[in-house]
Amino acid sequence: MGKSKAGRSNAARSVSPSAQQIAQRRQKRWAVLMRSLAAMFGGYAVTTLAVVCLSAALPMAPAFAVITATLLSFLILAVIAMWCFAAKTAARAWLGLLLMSLPLAALYGVMR
């Protein structure tokens, strides 16, 4: 009971993390970075392809089709970003983005 709160916190601070703990932290940070990059750049690429394909495929006037597809892009990007963080690994997130973009790119190539 003689120790103050400051005394206990100083004692806890003096214990340094082990090399394994540091490696685990770095690995987790790297995974979060890779998922963030997948969500930002991969999600943007898939969303752009989806918007291009949707705007050409929607059965309405071209201006309204582009506006509708653009409004849907916010939903598409949000779902893709959440999916990137729900995937088991960052590699699966990137692989999923690649698998989503391939049919969209093929459809875009056919439409041109």
Image: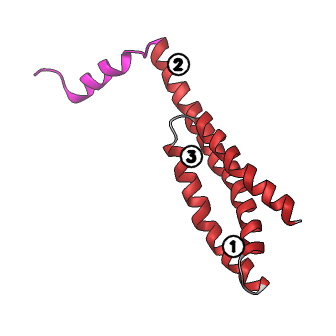
Q: Amino acid at mark 3?
A: Cys
If the image is split into quadrants, where does the N terminus sit? top left
Q: Residue at x 55, y 38 (%)?
A: 32
Q: Is residue 72 magenta?
A: no
Q: Is residue 7 magenta?
A: yes
How many labels sit on residues?
3
| Residue matched to label 3 | 84
Q: CA distance from mark 3 to mark 2?
A: 23 Å
Q: Position of residue 55 (x, y in %)?
A: 75, 74
| Residue matched to label 1 | 70
Q: Residue at x 52, y 41 (%)?
A: 87
- Category of crowding for the residue at label 2, using alpha-carbon neighbours closer than 10 angstroms: few (below 14), some (14–19), many (at least 20): few
Q: Amino acid at mark 2?
A: Ala
- Is 4 in front, or is 60? 60
Q: What secondary structure is marked by label 2?
A: helix
Q: Amino acid at mark 1?
A: Thr
Q: Nearer the viewer, mark 3 or mark 2?
A: 3
Answer with mark 1 or mark 3, whichever residue precedes in sequence: 1
- Category of crowding for the residue at label 3, using alpha-carbon neighbours closer than 10 angstroms: few (below 14), some (14–19), many (at least 20): many
Is residue 33 visible from the viewing direction of this image? no
Which residues, given as a range, are shown in magenta? Answer: 1-18
| Residue matched to label 2 | 23
Q: Position of residue 20 (x, y in %)?
A: 47, 14
Q: Is residue 84 left or right of residue 4?
A: right
Q: What secondary structure is marked by label 1?
A: helix
Answer with mark 1 or mark 2, whichever residue precedes in sequence: 2
